[in-house]
Amino acid sequence: MAAMMTVEFQNCFLFILLCFFTFLCYALFFKKPKGPRLGCDLPPSPPSLPIIGHLHLILSVLIHKSFQKISSKYGPFLYLRIFNLPIVLVSSASVAYEIFRSQDVNISSRGPSPIKKSLLLGSSNVINAPYGDYWKFMKKLMVKKLLGTQAIERSRKFRADELDQFYRNLLEKAIKKESVEIGEEAMKFTNNSICKMVMGRSCSEENGEAERVRSLVTKSTSLTTSFFLAAILRKPLKKLGISLFKKEIMGVSRRFDEVLKKILVEHEKKLEEHHQGTDMMDVLLEAYGDENAEYKITRSHIKSLFVDLFVAGTDTSMHTIQWILAEIINSPKILERLRKEIDSVVEKTRLIQETDLLNLPYLQAVVKEGLRLHPPVPLVLRTFQEECKIGGFYVPENTALVVNGYAVMRDPDIWEDPDEFKPERFIASSRSEKEDVLKFIAFGSGRRGCPGTNLASIFIGTAIGMMVQCFDYNIKGDKVNMAEAGGLNLTMAHPLQCTLVPRTKPFQCNL
């Protein structure tokens, strides 16, 4: 009898425990959004599961393709829920255009950082900072000293020197008939260019500084999916005292901190000796020490900005260069037409320069088409700060916005043969008015769109132009494998490797 009572008590206790756990899960993860307001309904929503909502629909290494598949089945404007996080998913060019046109201020923030103290997408980063005084101050500084038209003009020689070095690195490997990993060489070009523009010198190859920075950039890119999941699950896991992927993210952050501390000390000594600096690092340090500065920044702000510049400025351009060259190698007619244009404008007596780009419309079209098919960051992530009405549907406040740029720029309602590499679509005479209006969001859109669009186009244009002008390419097999790797950044599953054959006489250094 006592044994039976013990068993019944244990079963009762387990039942109570199960009820308590179910209630806890419901309270933490299954909190329903407030009912529709503004006299309209929420956007359409696919069938969901209890507790996890629509999480099972996006569990894939290629998240942008999972979102694209959902939209193909259920529609281009959807309301999703992952645990208790509401998400609006947009995969239509027309809906994306309406949101960026009418809700630009409302979606000008990206939501709280999952790990605030990290130099990598923490609360001090410009990329993740809320729209406000700090973000405005740093963007104005970046435009004035780094990314604006005049700043880009002032730093042209840095990029010309690095393009020449990029060419000579490839030429040396071509003469030796060594296999070249294009992404690896392109990263050196973009990283060294950014470093010179930002702090007046490239990272040192001799003491391992350059390799440390490049490896940290690569590691940061590999963590993009972790950032996404950490942001999505931040609220429910915070209530349980769990911080997802904190160890990995903070590990990269600490290693970045070690590198940047040394660079800061070096520049502070330089400022003490010369009293006034000229590069962006010097300007930031002056602002840091100015009690009357427009915005009082900290050393963490400076280091976080440099992490943003290293990652966004180096990695995205490198991957785009690799994708576009792969498309060109797979398209002999496009290669022939592009090479003919470059040879007619630049000729074969000197290396291509930035000033040539305006006279090379087909090269510009090739770059733009590569970015359309392979946007470096295929998902645009924002947050609706206030409730609003979009396309006749109600969107609650604090709803995450995911614009699938990958799907928008392959929208068959806007682009003819959307999955084909056809640079001709961006030649002015063949572009339709509809494409002009709705269109191209490879760098995001609105006030939180990428401020480095012009600089990235220069990096990509000159790199592709130089490689087409100077070399032929031998690959294994008939075509380059264009499979995509996992992560939020669009990368090649099989990095582009080839043997180069020089097609011009060696050029003298570009001055």
Image (cartoon, rainbow, N blue to C red):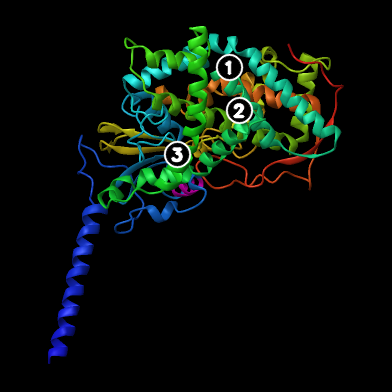
Q: What residue type is labelled 2?
A: Asn
Q: How crowded is mark 1: few (under 14 residues within 10 Å), some or many (20 or more)?
A: some
Magenta stretch prevailing secondary structure: helix
Magenta highlight on residue 67:
yes
Magenta highlight on residue 362:
no
Return the mark for residue 91: 3
User: Which quadrant: the C terminus?
Assistant: top right
Q: Which residues are drawn in magenta?
A: 65-72
- Front position among marks 3 and 1: 1
Q: What residue type is labelled 1?
A: Gly
Q: Nearer the viewer, residue 192 or 82?
A: 192
Mark positioned earlier in the residue sequence (3 or 1):
3
Tag 3–tag 2 contact (CB < 8 Å): no
Return the mark for residue 200: 1
Identify the residue position indicated by label 2 in the image.
191
Q: Name the spot of residue 46 as percent of width and height, x first.
A: 36, 51
